[in-house]
Image (cartoon, rainbow, N blue to C red):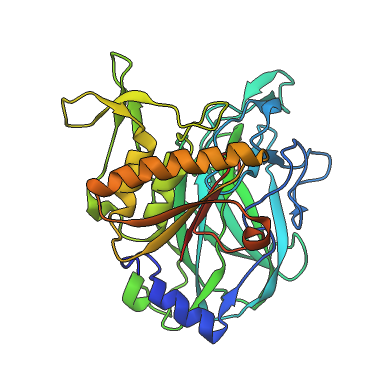
Amino acid sequence: MLRASLLTTALLATFLLSGQVITMLNPGFEDMPRHSHVPRFWTNCGPPGESPPDIQPELTFQVNLPAYEGNTYLGLVTRDNDTWEGVGTTLSQPLEKGKCYAFSISLARSLSYYSVSREKNVPANFIAPTRLRIWGGNDLCERSELLATSSVSDRGLWAVYTFILSPLEESYSNIVFEVFYEENILFPTNGNLLLDDASAFVFLPDCGAEAYGIQEDTNIAKEVTTTPAKVFSVREDNTLNLILPSLDYFSGPESLKGFISNVFAEIEFNAKGELVEEFYQVEGEKELRSGYPATHALAYALNAYPGEEWELVVFDQDKERQQQRVTSLKAVMDDWLFSYIFDCQVTGYDTALDDDTGWFYRSMANGLYLRML
């Protein structure tokens, strides 16, 4: 299994068996990209008279960051008229008073989010740093108790925020995710926060004392942040630079998922379904290579888990092109077996087998899915 992470696979398996996992519908905020609409199964919890949140990426506000997982994500903004956006949903069962839960979500800030200032009625770029607040309640959009507040998200990259939280006042059947201003500001600002890939709320019998060092009598929601490693950069001579972290970086599922989110975004096929070849250098080496840097990075990452079996599934509406993509990817991945030790099948998407399946990571925008066998 994957090495111990913030929430170990062994612990998660135990909690699943015990039934202490509380879920929500559409935790990845998947829907058709649109501005001023909330994803299915979510409710707009913003103030009356203001527009609802957005399903991103969507060109209206020039937001183009690829999804952390899946195809779309949620965009929330703060405004200079002292209003801010939020969404709410009902949980599969209540978060119980006095019990502790682990929860994680991927957050980012878009470096472009162009709209109109509500205070000055002029064009504005809503890019001030913001943070996430998580509320518990017993009706949609009810904010009875603040369960967790994130640190400020101020970079244009996805990061996984993990919280340990515990309702202290009562049990809650509903939650609200809302964006809020950074601390100690003198006046309200135009900012944004992107949300993707929310986890279940996982019950921690000892309040995470062993894994997180938190005691059950604390009322502080502890946060741990995991930032996906940067995989690609461009040198001054326009050569692509491939950055491979040490194998110790891949300490668990979230580290690997974050790395793969950057890798999948760089896997490029031509119109025939063939991988696009390019020149690149591995950081720290002088050799100029010709090949496929994204598949190099993928093979390197999977090599960190030699005992795991993986399946890389490729989707394309054109079935002939889908098969060509499979053939091209399989040939390149097989070539890396001479340099690395990993077990990864490459197959085409089969509706009968793959619809509604569980995925370790998926990028619907690029038609690439990864599952652990």
Look at the picture and state if 125 lies above or below 360.
Answer: above
Looking at the image, which is closer to me, 301 or 14?
301
Compared with 4, 235 (above or below) is: above
Outermost residue toward the right?
49
Q: Position of residue 155 (x, y in %)?
A: 45, 36
In the image, residue 248 above or below residue 15: above
Q: Is any part of residue 229 visible from this angle?
A: no
In depth, the one of 171 and 169 nearer the eye is: 171
Q: Position of residue 211 (x, y in %)?
A: 34, 73
**In the figure, is residue 185 to the left or right of 243?**
right
The residue depicted at 52 percent of the width and 47 percent of the height is 107
Which image quadrant is residue 74 in? top right
In the image, residue 132 lies at what x, y percent?
56, 50
Residue 56 seen by the camera = yes
- Quarter containing the N terminus: bottom left
Q: Please name the residue shown 43% across and 55% down the image.
A: 345
Tell whether 111 sits left or right of 56.
left
Count of numbered circles on the image: 0
- Considering depth in this image, is 127 or 367 the residue closer to the camera? 367
From the top left corner, tell me how far across and down residue 138 is, in percent.
Answer: 74, 71
Residue visible at 68% across and 18% down?
A: 123
Lateral position of residue 251 relative to residue 65, left or right: left
